[in-house]
């Protein structure tokens, strides 16, 4: 065991999750593969969405994986940075929009 | 701002200018297996040609650019160029065959003073001619008329463009390259290139701008067509995605950036038997600026000429002997067999 929670080499062990409950793992990985196939969205667009979500959920494995993947799919650094801003804007906006709830309470309670 | 490009390895006297030093840098890596073992494990025999369909002539290392990933180590400071006498030997050899395609590369091949002469003679022999063009050369005063020349001789033009936006292109190829490239593409379009006419075929070639594999060619081609039309009004016929080979200046960058071992591990892990079967060395003969013969342009840059007992200079050209030659392989060959495969014609699977 390491004395820290995340190790970049562990990403390559993701498949080991199927050593238990292999049927569930297979369903997950098959579905995951299908999700990222070319469709109504291009593989580059899907990769940028994945990169943005990786930042929103703050998954270091996903950030490593989809930084590389987005570049391999033809995204450049400006496009990747814009995707991260989109994730950040939604995260920030999600907090800020709760200010409406705060204002509703404050308006009701206050004079 | 793109980082500045640097002079060629050769003119800097860098150790990696020597092919022996490049082999040694690759040999030191603890790879999971050798290329020949990968072929064997996939049930593939050692590589031999199918038939020679592409006669690739590297007319010299002189170039107006010094791209950071260049496998030729080309640049304005390189002066090795093919003479007209050696070109004539190529034409004599071609005339004795039915090899349909002549692929002219460099450097910037257009900087060879006999480039146009060579194109005209190849066309007189009835061969399809491809020119590997860096685009910016078409914006220099001495070469601005080349789009018209290409159109007149039905030359297929294959142009390097790493990305449809400026930042990545300029990072790999030098500041201002993207803007000039778009100007050149616009002029090629004006001469009918990129509109689906087989006699005005315009191909773009993209290499990754870093230590990663190229993306899916069909998807990227569709996206590039849409984006280049939307952003710049440029059209083209096809996009080829090519893997960067771990040799020469790209090898130097891999070492300096600390990416070499991981990049090679990735190439080895992505070995694709189908890509090996379709490797370009199986249908290509590569001629160096001095007339020496090679299996491909990469082996040429590593001084790996066609083997013992086989003609290794164009003056000794023998099609039957060359079509039965063993192909020289090494760790660098994992670059052509990773993923969807990579060749001068894009993916190979």
Image (cartoon, coloured by chain):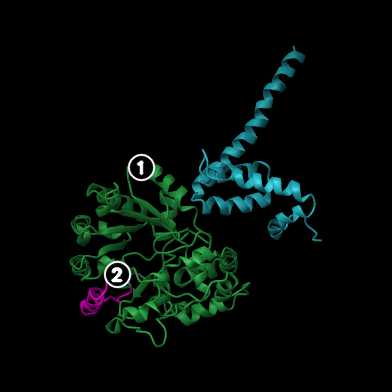
**Mark 2 Cα within 10 Å, few/some/many (few <14, many 20+)?**
some
Considering depth in this image, is B155 or B140 the residue closer to the camera? B155
Instruction: Name the residue tied to disc 1.
Output: B229
Mark 2, mark 1: which one is toward the viewer?
A: 2
Which picture quadrant has residue B325? bottom left
User: Which lettered chain is shown in cyan?
Assistant: A
Q: Which residue is farthest top?
A: A111
On screen, residue B94 versus residue B221, left or right, reads left
**Could you say where residue B40 lies in the image, as x and y percent from the top left?**
57, 74
**What residue is pinned by disc 2?**
B99
Check the picture and name the quadrant holding the N terminus of chain B: bottom left
Write the residue at 65% across / 26% down. A97
Residue in front for this viewpoint, B71 or B153: B153
B86 in magenta: yes
Which chain identifier belongs to the green chain?
B
Q: Position of residue B26 (x, y in %)?
A: 54, 76
Does A97 sit left or right of B9 as displayed? Answer: right
Q: Do the residues labelled 2 and 1 touch (CB within 8 Å)?
A: no
Chain identifier of the residue bearing label 2 in the image:
B
Q: Position of residue B318 (x, y in %)?
A: 31, 81
Q: Distance between the residues labelled 2 and 1?
A: 35 Å
Q: What stretch is highlighted in magenta?
A: B75-97
């Amino acid at each position: 065991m390491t004395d820290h929670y995340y190790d970049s080499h562990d990403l390559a062990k993701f498949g080991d999750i199927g050593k238990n409950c292999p049927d569930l793992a297979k369903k997950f990985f098959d579905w995951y593969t299908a999700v990222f196939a070319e469709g109504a969205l291009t593989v580059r667009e899907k990769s940028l969405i994945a990169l943005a979500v990786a930042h929103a959920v703050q998954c270091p494995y996903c950030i490593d994986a989809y930084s590389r993947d987005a570049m391999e799919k033809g995204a450049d650094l400006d496009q990747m940075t814009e995707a991260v801003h989109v994730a950040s804007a939604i995260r920030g906006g999600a907090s800020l929009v709760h200010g409406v709830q705060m204002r509703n309470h404050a308006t009701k309670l206050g004079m | 701002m793109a980082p500045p490009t640097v002079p060629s390895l050769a003119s800097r006297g860098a150790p990696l200018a020597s092919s022996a030093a490049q082999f040694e840098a690759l040999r030191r890596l603890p790879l999971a297996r050798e290329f020949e073992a990968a072929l064997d494990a996939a049930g593939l025999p050692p590589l031999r040609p199918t038939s020679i369909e592409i006669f690739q002539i590297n007319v010299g290392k002189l170039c107006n650019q010094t791209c950071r990933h260049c496998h030729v180590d080309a640049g304005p400071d390189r002066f090795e160029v093919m003479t007209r006498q050696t070109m004539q030997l190529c034409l004599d050899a071609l005339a004795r065959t039915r090899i349909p395609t002549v692929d002219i590369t460099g450097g910037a091949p257009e900087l060879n003073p006999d480039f146009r002469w060579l194109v005209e003679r190849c066309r007189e022999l009835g061969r399809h001619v491809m020119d590997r063009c860096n685009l910016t050369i078409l914006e220099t005063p001495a070469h601005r008329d080349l789009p018209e020349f290409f159109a007149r001789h039905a030359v297929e033009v294959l142009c390097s463009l790493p990305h449809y936006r400026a930042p990545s292109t300029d990072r790999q190829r030098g500041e201002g390259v993207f803007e000039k490239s778009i100007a050149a593409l616009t002029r090629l379009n004006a001469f009918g290139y990129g509109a689906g006419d087989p006699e005005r075929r315009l191909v773009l070639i993209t290499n990754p701008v870093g230590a990663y594999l190229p993306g899916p060619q069909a998807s990227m081609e569709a996206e590039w067509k849409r984006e280049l039309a939307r952003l710049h009004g440029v059209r083209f016929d096809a996009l080829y995605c090519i893997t960067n080979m771990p040799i020469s200046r790209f090898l130097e960058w891999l070492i300096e950036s600390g990416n070499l071992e991981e990049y090679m591990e990735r190439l080895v892990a992505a070995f694709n038997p189908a890509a090996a079967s379709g490797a370009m060395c199986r249908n290509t003969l590569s001629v160096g600026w001095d007339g020496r013969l090679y299996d491909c342009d990469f082996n040429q840059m590593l001084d790996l000429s066609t083997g013992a007992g086989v003609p290794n200079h164009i003056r000794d050209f023998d099609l039957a002997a060359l079509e039965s030659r063993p192909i020289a392989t090494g760790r660098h060959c994992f670059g052509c067999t990773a993923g969807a495969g990579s060749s001068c014609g894009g993916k190979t699977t």
